[in-house]
Image: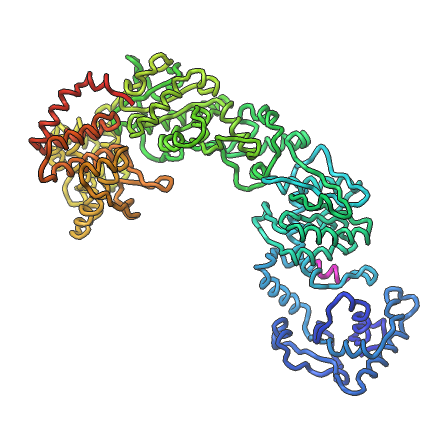
Amino acid sequence: MTTNPKKSDFSIAKYFLSYLTLRKSFKITPNSLILCTAAKLNVADIMDKLPADENLQKIFGSERKMYKAQNKEGMVDKFLDKIKQFQEKINENEKDKEEWKNSDINTEDIKTFICSFVVVKIDLMSIKSLIGTKLNELGYKFPISSYEYVKDRVEEWYHLSTNKFVPMTKDYLMFILCGEHNRNFFQDLVNTNIYFKESHQFNSDNIICVQIHDNIAIAMHLIKILRSIQKSEKSYFPLKENILCLMQEKENIFHQMKYTMQYTVLCDMINTFKCDNMKYLVVSFLSLNKFQTLELYKKICDLTKENRNKKVFIIIKEDYLQSSKPLVKIIDDKIYFNSLESDTQNFILDKKILFQGELVPLKDLKNVKNIIREIDEIEIDECIEKIIFNKDYYSIGCNFQNQSKPDEFYINRSLMDNSKIFPEKDFFEKIDKNIVVITGPSGAGKTTILKKIVKLKKGKDEVDSKLTWIINVDLRKTKQFFRKGIEKNMTNLLCHNENITANVTPDSSYLAHLERKLIESMDKILIIDGLDENNYSDDIEKIRNLLADHNSLQALNISLVIMCARDYDCILKQLRDLHSCELRLIPFSPSEKSSYLNEHLKEIMSGNIKNDLFEEVTNSAPAFEAICSTPLSLEMVAKIIKNKVSKNNCIESLSKIFDTVTNIYDFYSCYLQVIKDEFAQDNDKLRGAFDRYYIDSLRKFAAKCMFSDFPNLLDLLNVDDSYEINKDALNVGLIKELNGEYKFVHKTFEEYFAAEFLWDCLCNKKKQRHDLLLEVLNTVFLKSEYLGVLDFIEEILKINPNEKISKISSEYNLALTTVNWKKTYHF
């Protein structure tokens, strides 16, 4: 044990004197002064091996050799003698050891040291490994991503000169552990291209309170604070090493990290601000109550009084410090777009967002610069941080095309305007109307051609370097809209459809104001699909009234409204004065039917498909061609053929299958048998379950979707309304899940099952009362939206005649001729 201060050998005297100068910073307990060393120890005369100590073994493991100073008679005097020898040998020129040389030593200090001092024999590599392991164990409290950062800070601390030395207290260790995130967070904030026209100025107290408000952008305020610090420091200033940032709750938007600092920890961490290299403190009081705010504020004031060079930013929300002593400078800070420097404004406008599913710079949205000037009185808040900082792109508007299947086979369609026929690709060249209704029978591909027209428009916009907001007016959302307590105008309807806040107030978010202004000013096309295929007659009347307001459409820059319907007259009966027209979707030609069927068969089954298959079947089953004339019906045919081929039926014999199909209802029933075969897989139990559960549930589900007065209809028919659609029903392929709700894959399946539900209810009555049948028909068929169900009922009557029902049906047919039907057809 050397007594020479110039030697680096193991020296009890050196460690005792170090302890003596720093003991005020530590809470000294038995075995709490631990020396880790790899030096060769010749200490048998003063130290013994330490008995097992549970706490030390938790840290170092049981295999490490540990030593403890001998606590026996004469040992204190022996230590005192060695230490005095060490002091006497300190040279007058060794200024860093001057405090050691002049320290007064008494026996009580030595006794405390002997009780507390422990030596652990361990090499440097083992220490590194041990520290790494312990840091990983602390991961749930302090998620450290880089051990190297912590190691470097510890080494930096180790090499501090004596006059600048800071004790490695629990608080200081916590500062190092959290410091990495503090450093990364600040570095990324400083590196952003965000600059402000004005900065915060300190007064003589060197404390600024920045008061912010609800839904504000914390990151933006932090950047403004950092820019203020940079501006006050004329030359280069290493922010990450000289600023302590204490946010009680902070989410690091760059590194997807979030940690919470308890109030007690926050108080302890304030002590690390005493470090000489810490010049600035940025601390959040947002989560503190009044007592905690005042207590912590007093502590900060005391620190700044001790060192006038230290400066503090306090972020507050409540007015707890309005009457504090001493009084503090409170800045009611609000950040507006216009308060940013011009380059920063352009930086934000260059940021890309998802506009209806496509990446575009924010500045490309029409009038966005003018809109931002209009809403400059609205404070930039945390919402706009999503555009500035988030890795995920901010999204505006719904994408109508996202339901498309890009790889599916498609035959380009033709459209007819009066007597002129033109291909779909010429749509925007041929149409000069404000409202267009594309008509065609059910399953003809109206929804598909809508998607193609939208794609055409987007391609045209790309060539013309412009953006058009194409809004799909979803009739389900529209039903919700007309039941909400907001003003019923076209702007609010469009906002509701695009998931944009309709009721914008001064307290609404910055982006809510921006989106509202954008939807009012941008060029728009409205898409309304299946307007006469929904049972929302009252709502459809309201939509039509909104469309009739030509001035409103012009004011909102709605250049075109494209609707799809089965019947043109039903849609525009009262809108004939508008600049509108009907476009009829031209049916497939025989060759197109053949191509579509063959391509669809290739998609769903293997083997060679004969090119003239469609022609062969239609020649032997004439009814087939009339029934199967649409894309939907041809897809159903393909599935039927696949099913029969899987049962070893040759393709040549398929004509026999379709020869027995006499009408469209028969065809759908045939298709349903195929669905049942695929579901059951020759299992009789599954086949029975399909009939008992799935079919019954699908019928009731269809009736509920179809008939607006479903509960009253069930009461009228005296039918139990209980049914359940299980998740595995999706596997049947007749319904799908959309936005958390079940929906039939096509409207005609809903109409088919609703017709079956009615037929089954009426036919299973033991006594079919004439007045009951009339009332059911009255309830259902005097409403135009049920025309598809009526068509299926009439087809059922042709196959399964029922004298009573046929008689009543004939009465209805006399009353509802084609002319009279259209005259009384109303919404």
Number of on-image labels: 0
Frontmost residue, 401 versus 827:
827
Determine whether, in the image, residue 14 is placed left or right of residue 544.
Answer: right
Q: Position of residue 242 (x, y in %)?
A: 74, 50
Q: Position of residue 781 (x, y in %)?
A: 20, 27
- In the figure, residue 702 lies in which quadrant? top left
- In the figure, residue 328 lies in which quadrant? top right
Q: Main secondary structure of the magenta part?
A: helix
- Camera sees residue 609: no
Q: Position of residue 475 (x, y in %)?
A: 36, 30
Q: Is residue 755 magenta?
A: no
Q: Residue furthest front?
A: 323
The vertical placement of 132 against 796, above or below, is: below
Frontmost residue, 148 versus 712:
712
Image quadrant occupied by the N terminus: bottom right
Frontmost residue, 760 versus 344:
760
* Magenta-colored span: 153-159
Image quadrant occupied by the C terminus: top left
- Camera sees residue 343: yes
Identify the residue at horizontal 62%, vertical 55% (top origin): 261
- In the figure, residue 223 lies in which quadrant? top right
Q: Is residue 155 magenta?
A: yes
Q: Position of residue 727 (x, y in %)?
A: 30, 47
Frontmost residue, 757 versus 40:
757
The vertical placement of 433 against 467, above or below, is: above
The vertical placement of 657 against 1, above or below, is: above
Determine whether, in the image, residue 450 is placed left or right of residue 249.
Answer: left
Q: Residue furthest left?
A: 803
